[in-house]
Every structure is written in structure tokens, then in C-alpha cells.
Amino acid sequence: SQELEQSPQSLIVQEGKNLTINCTSSKTLYGLYWYKQKYGEGLIFLMMLQKGGEEKSHEKITAKLDEKKQQSSLHITASQPSHAGIYLCGAGNKLVFGAGTILRVKS
Amino acid sequence: EPEVTQTPSHQVTQMGQEVILRCVPISNHLYFYWYRQILGQKVEFLVSFYNNEISEKSEIFDDQFSVERPDGSNFTLKIRSTKLEDSAMYFCASSEGPPGLGAKNIQYFGAGTRLSVL
């Protein structure tokens, strides 16, 4: 079965700094979802990547899918306190999730 | 903006009791899901449901669990005899189209029900 590994597990950045979160799959990645979870809350859909090489942006968040590396990256530019939370990657029809990356932004 | 609504937000129950977790999916969605997240662990798929039938279920979804769409708006997860290890956050999700990759296949999640089994 497919497993997704996220790195880093947690991240503390100064407000205004850029950061990258990675998600690596144990099997071929045909597509991937990124969600954000606030502590004790539900999962908020961020982006969906459908094919290798695809890159999508929403506000200051950019996600890319590298099919050959079986990896996706999520990049946040000029981080803000509102970006704090847990970022989850998910793949497959029965969504399999990574363990999540906890992001804290210091102001 | 349409959203998935779950009630209650927190449910406390005694071991061995039955619980029903309720969800109101987004109104034009046809595919429904339950996931759970034990504290400190990954979000795990439990079951998917379409056209009043279970489409897929995980190994976790044993005979203690059942799902139902009792009317045109609600989707429920019943745990027949709760165990301590059932304590978790339970998330309901819905999508317009079947699981997959596409705008209609995106699964939208509710805020979750925290189930505490004592």
C-alpha cells in the first residue's frame, strides 16, 4: 500500500521567511492533494496536483509535483501567522495521508 | 460557501455504549466518506459510500462500525459497542464526483467530532 512521508515533521519560521515542505511517496504518484489542518479542526483543501511537472499557486503558496522523484513540495513565500497549522499531503482514491508538517510562524 | 457540517463537536461515552456521529455533506455531493485520526497519528480512511451502499472500506471498519444515509441530508457513522481505542477525531468528507483527481473529485472535510471513550 502507498505511504506518504512528509518532511520536516515540524518547522518554526520567522514571519516573512520562505519555507518548503516535502511529501515523498513510496509508490508512483499519479496526483496529490494538499490540505491544511488547524489544531483540533478539520482539513481545509488547498491544492490538487494532477500530473507530473504540474505547479499550482494560491496566494503565497505554491505546490509542485515531481512524478519521477515521486515527490511533491509545498512552498510558502513570505510566511505570515495565518499560515500556521498542520500541512498534510494526501494521495489515492481512499485518501492516504502523510503524518503532517506542523508549521509555526513567529511574529 | 457550502461546507460539511458535523455534530456533535465532542462526544463523551462509556466503553460498550453505542454512539452515532452525524454529518451533513455538501448538498450536491454524492460521495461520502469517514476518516479518523487518533491523537498524534495520521488521518486514516474508514469508509466510502455512494448510492446508499458502501463503496470501499478499510480494515479498521469492522462489524462494530456501520454507516447510513437515513434521509436526503444526513450521513451517519455508528459505532455499536465503543472501545477505549475508538477514541479519536472522526472526520466526515464529501465529494461531487467519485474518488480521483479532478475538480469534482476533491473531498471536502468537516471540522470533525472528537470521540472520547471512558
Image: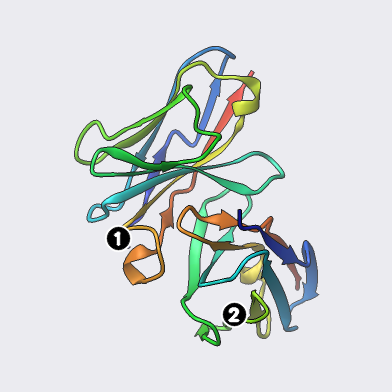
Q: Nearer the viewer, residue B41 or B11?
A: B41
Using the image, name the chain to which the residue with label 2 belongs: A
Q: Quadrant where the C terminus of chain B lies?
A: top right
Q: Secondary structure at mark 2?
A: loop
Using the image, name the chain to which the residue with label 1 belongs: B
At label 2, the amino acid type is: Glu
Residue B100 x/y as whole percent: 40, 64
Q: Residues under labels 2 and 1: Cα distance?
A: 24 Å
Examine the image and state in which quarter residue A6 appears: bottom right
> Outermost residue, left direction?
B72
At label 1, the amino acid type is: Gly
Residue B95 x/y as whole percent: 34, 57
Q: Nearer the viewer, residue B75 or B3?
A: B75
Asked whether the residues under the numbered discs 2 and 1 touch, taking CB atoms below 8 Å apart as contact, a structural biologist would say no
Examine the image and state in which quarter residue B34 appears: top left
* Residue in the picture at 55% in, 50% down: A41
Depicted B63 relative to depicted A18: above or below: above
Is residue A103 visible to the viewer in this orientation of the structure? Answer: no
Q: Nearer the viewer, mark 2 or mark 1?
A: 2
- Disc number at residue A67? 2
Residue marked by disc 1: B97
* Residue in the picture at 78% in, 61% down: A9
Examine the image and state in which quarter residue B59 appears: top right
* Residue in the picture at 26% in, 51% down: B30
Depicted B54 relative to depicted A49: above or below: above
> Relative to residue B45, is residue B87 drawn left or right?
right
Residue A82 x/y as whole percent: 61, 69
Depicted A46 relative to depicted B20: above or below: below
